[in-house]
Amino acid sequence: MSIVQEFYSIAGTVLKDQRRVPSIRVEAVEPTPAGPRVRWTGGPTGHRVVSVEDGTRWRGGVGPQVLLEAISRTLAVRWRERTPTVPADWSDRLAARHPRVFTSGGPYTCPGWASLWAAGAEWIEEVGVPPGFATDDAKAKFGTARWHHHADDWSDDVADVVEAIETISDGICEACGAPGRTRFRPWIETLCHTHNTEPR
């Protein structure tokens, strides 16, 4: 699957609750120091619409354009570090590369989300790590990422990054980083088709 196909696949999963989604069109894949970045036009604007179990819908959270940006950044890291397997110590390496973000060690998830966490850390560093920022816990729960953090000075930009990373994890396989979706097995996981068919 190409980076463009991965972008469309993850975007389709993450934006599934949007009504009348304007077409998203990939215009280019640009080389950047952060990795190959997908550039797009179109897509929904404004607030994200989320379906609730009882069939109702609510508006809130980061907007779809922020989610598309998070997907582009995550794929840039994934394709920049294109390796068949993620090193066993990926979490420790990530914490060592981003000590101001992962203050008490790296995330506690499967390696498929390594690029997701790295993209989030790089984005937080880009918008500015707030004074006293600390990651309290970074883990998987009910098939999506959970990034618990605090800071002495609240930053809406950092809060948006964290929410975007948590939200797009719903479309990324925990095991390998390929496009995936939430699966209800003995426990809830986000997996690609291949890893959903393998015993875990």
Image (cartoon, grey):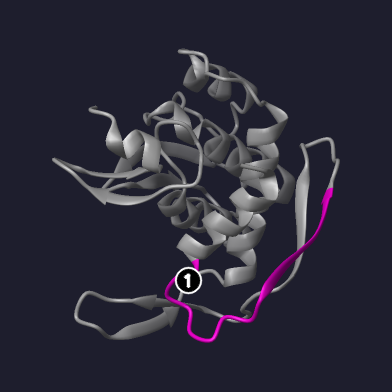
Residue that lies at the very extreme toward the left in this rendered image? 186
- 181 within the magenta span: no
Q: Is residue 107 left or right of residue 199?
A: right
Residue 170 lies, with reference to residue 197, above or below; the image says below
Residue pictured at 43% horizontal, 47% vertical: 180
Across and down, in percent, residue 53 comes to: 22, 74
Across and down, in percent, residue 93 comes to: 56, 17
- 16 within the magenta span: yes
Using the image as rendered, state which of residue 92 and residue 31 is in the foreground: 31
Helix, strand, or loop for circle 1? loop
Using the image as rendered, state which of residue 179 and residue 149 is in the foreground: 179
- State which quarter of the image contains the C terminus: top left
Q: What's the magenta bit mostly, secondary-structure-wise?
A: loop
Across and down, in percent, residue 191 comes to: 36, 42
Identify residue for label 1.
Answer: 61
Across and down, in percent, residue 90 comes to: 51, 19
Image quarter of residue 11: bottom right
Q: Is residue 61 left or right of residue 75?
A: left
Residue pictured at 68% horizontal, 45% vertical: 3
Stretch of the chain drawn in magenta:
15-29
Residue 121 lies, with reference to residue 66, above or below; the image says above
Local packing at callout 1 (Cα closer than 10 Å; few below 14, some 14-19, many 20+) is some
Residue pictured at 68% horizontal, 34% vertical: 79
Q: Is residue 45 left or right of residue 126?
A: left
Image quarter of residue 131: top right
Using the image as rendered, state which of residue 114 and residue 178 is in the foreground: 178
Residue 200 lies, with reference to residue 170, above or below; the image says above
User: Can residue 129 be seen in the rendering of this structure?
Assistant: no
Residue pictured at 57% horizontal, 35% vertical: 115
Kindly identify the amino acid type of the residue bearing the numbered disc 1. Gly
Image quarter of residue 81: top right
